[in-house]
Image (tube, coloured by chain):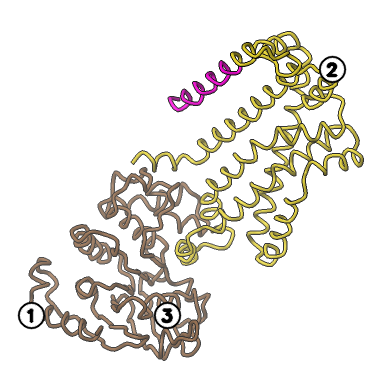
Amino acid sequence: MESKFTATGVGVTADGAVRILGGRRVLDRVDLRLPAQSRVGIVGRSGAGKSTLFSLVAGLDQPDAGTIAVGDRTTARERLARCALMPQRDCLLPWRTALDNAALALENAGVPRREARRRAAPLFARLGLGGSELLLPAKLSGGMRQRVAFLRTLLADKPVLLLDEPFGALDAITRAELQQWLREALASEPRTVLLVTHDVEEALLLCECVLVLADGRVTAELTVEVPRDLPRREIVTSPAFVDLREQALEAIG
Amino acid sequence: MRRIWPPLALLAAAIALWAVVVWAAEVPDYLFPSPAAVASSLADDSGSLGSATLVTVREIVLGYLLAVGVALALAFVLHFSAALRRALLPILVLSQTVPTVLLAPILAILLGYGLEPKLIVVAVVCFFPVVVNAVDGLRAADPELIRMMRTLHGGRLTIFRRVELPGALPAIFSGARVAATYAAVGAVFGEWAGSSAGLGFVILQAQPALDTARIFAAVLILSALALILYGLVTLAERLLIPWQREADCV
């Protein structure tokens, strides 16, 4: 699935972004720098401004001061054209099959349904969802629903993916499975990824860089350098990983 | 189908009680007819009652379709325009405080004894629950889902067609089911205000003749018509919202 964006990728930057909601500075001079096809995690308590930052990057909202750029574009409309959002709950449409849910963005963009299905189907097989194409969401497990939701985000064919606590509602075992799955999926479909989570471990496992957001400001920026090819259990117990986790938890406060 | 037996049994018991009370107290038929008298009136007058039923069915069905059509069109407009919604919804609520019974004679004066005034009375009676439920249902769409759709190439109309409208169908149908039970009453009001045929007209004619059994027969048919309309709307709901049953089965 090559396109004008995904072949080379697009970065995201924020310079002094401020957003005031209801008299409160939800975001207070936030700077971000995501190189193209990098994976950056944002952790913080609820109410730290994570979702607001997402709305700004996605072009669903405008900063009160500062600038946000996706690629070299700064208008809300152009940011919106380059970002795809995966919400916290899977938000699958209950009246569409898994395949039709995944193909939603293609149909929204005007691709006829048959053609949209034809383009979405190979991704199902490749990412381990073969056989569930024709099931309605009600028949899928939580983990499968989240996988379909991620495919739907991928198939929007946008260079930047905004993942908002994608595995927040899953049990620990399924979540670990999906984290591994997401790493593999992103290896075969590279994108610039901004991942919001309250799970520090998840951010460190999936991202190259983790920002800690507290009271609307970036209070720590951690470059994640840990061995990636080991089994999960060995990664999370490695000294480097433990040290990063401590730093992040301390910055969250 | 098993759910149909308890109410049916209760209904049978009520009819039996009715028959026993009328028989034991020796109530004359013109005051309160026995079930047997109503049944024989249904059988004896089946020809005239049948043609009256056809007239009323026409009023009910066309009036109901008119109500649903106008209500949905209005709900869509109100959904897209917040300004109109704020201005018009309170007036719609206010309009419901005007007794529609009073509207019928005015319409008969304006439009005569034909089909049109009855359609309008039926439509006015049925229209409100559909509009209100449709507007609420459309607005109940998950805001997170809409944010997501906007990042997935979803324009305003696409979001309406793919998210808001299908999501509002259960609400629209619950309004439509309530409206279905009003339609028959609306048609009778319409006929009472001025008509020369229909079940309401049959009731008007039977009253001075003290033909109470015939009135009961007409009422029975009207109830059956309302029930059938309700059943048809429920059937349409099942066909149009199959995912709801699928979700229930899990």
Residue that appears at 37% across and 85% down: A216
The majority secondary structure of the magenta stretch comes to helix
Q: Are marks 2 and 1 on the same chain?
A: no
Measured along the vertical axis of the image, is residue A101 above or below residue A48?
A: above
Q: Which mark is residue A71?
A: 3
Q: What is the spatial separation of the Cα atoms under label 3 and label 1, in whole angstroms?
A: 36 Å
Q: Are marks 3 and 1 on the same chain?
A: yes
- SS category of the residue bearing label 3: loop
Residue that appears at 88% across and 38% down: B108
The N terminus of chain B sits in image quarter: top left
Residue B50 sits in quarter: top right
Q: What is the spatial separation of the Cα atoms under label 3 and label 2, in whole angstroms?
A: 86 Å
Q: Is residue B227 magenta?
A: no
Which of the two residues, A122 or A164, is positioned nearer the viewer here?
A: A164
Q: Which residue is mark 1?
A: A239
Region in magenta? B1-18
Q: Are marks 3 and 2 on the same chain?
A: no
In the rendered picture, chain B carries what hue? yellow
Left or right: B232 in relation to B27: left
Type of amino acid under label 1: Pro
